[in-house]
Image: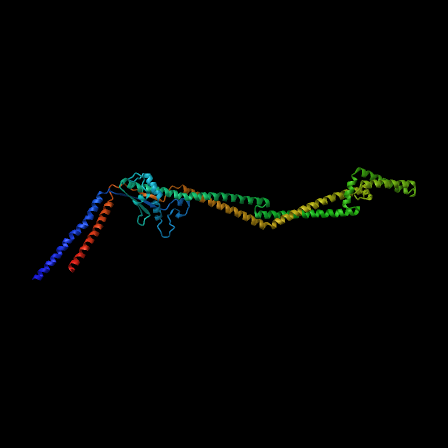
Amino acid sequence: MTSQRIDLYSDNSGSSARRVRWLPTLSIFAVPVAVAAIWGSLQAPEYRSQAKLLFEREEVSEFTGLPENAGDFTSLVRDQNPLLTEIEFLQSRPILEDTINELDLRNEEGTLLASGTLRDNLAVSVVGAADIIEISYTSNDPEIAAQVPNTLAQFYIDGYLERKNSQPREARNILENQLAVAEQRLENSETQLREFRERNNFVNANEYSSFVINAIASLDQDILGTQSRLDELSARINSRVSSLGVTTREAQSIRSLSQDPAVTAVIANLALAENDLAAQRKLHSDSSPIITSIQENIRSLRAQLDTLTLGQNISTRQLSLYADPQQQTSLAELSGEELERQGLQSRMSALQSSRDNYSSRLRDLPRLEQEQSRLEENIASSRGELTNLNQLLQRLVVTERSSVSNASLIEPAATPVSPSGGGMRIYLASGILLGGLLASTYNFWQQQASSRTQGG
């Protein structure tokens, strides 16, 4: 009976001890929570507002002819969301500083807020799997909480437009330089083709070939006619030379000398003297003074004629041919025919030279065709390049002047009408965590102390 009473008493004592131990545990837990709640209630209320940016493909490519992905956001890192790059740009120091200066954000000391402080209260994230970025800002001032996301988004859109237009602007400058080079190249190619055609009298290969062939055929006819006339003259001249006993050169010299009055007079006197000598020989012997006188006169006339014909290598007998009217006509015709033959020979040489020239040009026709084709290909290539550069330049100008951004503010931040409550929740959560930690620690040490007491 006593033992049972003692056990019952012991059990009741343990329950009572546990009940007594839970009272300070609850007190230890409640104190940090209460302190955190009181401290949180004493803090200034915080307001939170957010704006949303939508990113979409730029439709201007449909009008400019640029590739369809010209306005898409891409990343250099494989399998990475390109919007992460835009998030970093949104939180970059220049945009934060522009926002601070625009809104004149200052700290408690009255100096402009640091960009790092603004970033600490800023949250930028991608909304789910959509192409939307949410910009939220927490501030004690509800107006500032709404103005910061909106101003930040606007500075980002303006900066994006500048970034988007800077590349086409740089590309346009490069294209304009290439365009000037292409125009100069085209002008040089056209000049080379024009000079080639003028130098070779070459426009169209088929027309040029027909022209050269017809020219050669016409020259062949002229050569045949000239050669026939030349052969006829040569035969007639040879016949006259044989009958007169003088060459064509001598005939021309005789005709030239016979036109000199002094030579003509000596020839006439010489002919009379020779005729007189022949008549006197019939009456007198060669020793007669009359014959001797006539012979002396003939020698004097011949000496005088030799003096007048010095260097012509023409004999007196040959000159005397001109005294005969019939021979005179033959000599004149011989001289004229010789002049005509010389003219025909010159014409024959010119015709043959022209024919050789056209024949050479006909042989060069394949080379000329190849050269013209090369020059025309150069012009076609330069024109094609010029057309492509002009089209691309026009597209770049349209893109550069475009004021359409891939990013648009689809949901501006609104001024919050009530605190976000996030600060109080943080304080309460901190108090609960601290209270739980202290209560657990207290309970653990109490259990350890009880174990040591029972063991003793």
Quarter the C terminus occupies: bottom left
Q: 133 and 319: which one is in front?
A: 133
Q: Residue furthest left?
A: 1
Q: Position of residue 138 (x, y in %)?
A: 28, 43
Q: Residue furthest front?
A: 456
Using the rendered image of the protein, determine whether residue 180 is visible from the camera's viewpoint: yes
Q: Position of residue 50 (x, y in %)?
A: 29, 44
Rendered residue at 18%/50% (across/down)? 28
Q: 344 and 435: which one is in front?
A: 435
Using the rendered image of the protein, determine whether residue 221 is visible from the camera's viewpoint: no
Image quarter of residue 7: bottom left
Rendered residue at 70%/48% (across/down)? 228
Q: 61 and 111: which one is in front?
A: 111
Q: Position of residue 39 (x, y in %)?
A: 22, 44
Rendered residue at 43%/43% (across/down)? 170
Left or right: residue 154 compared with residue 389: left
How many numbered markers are drawn?
0
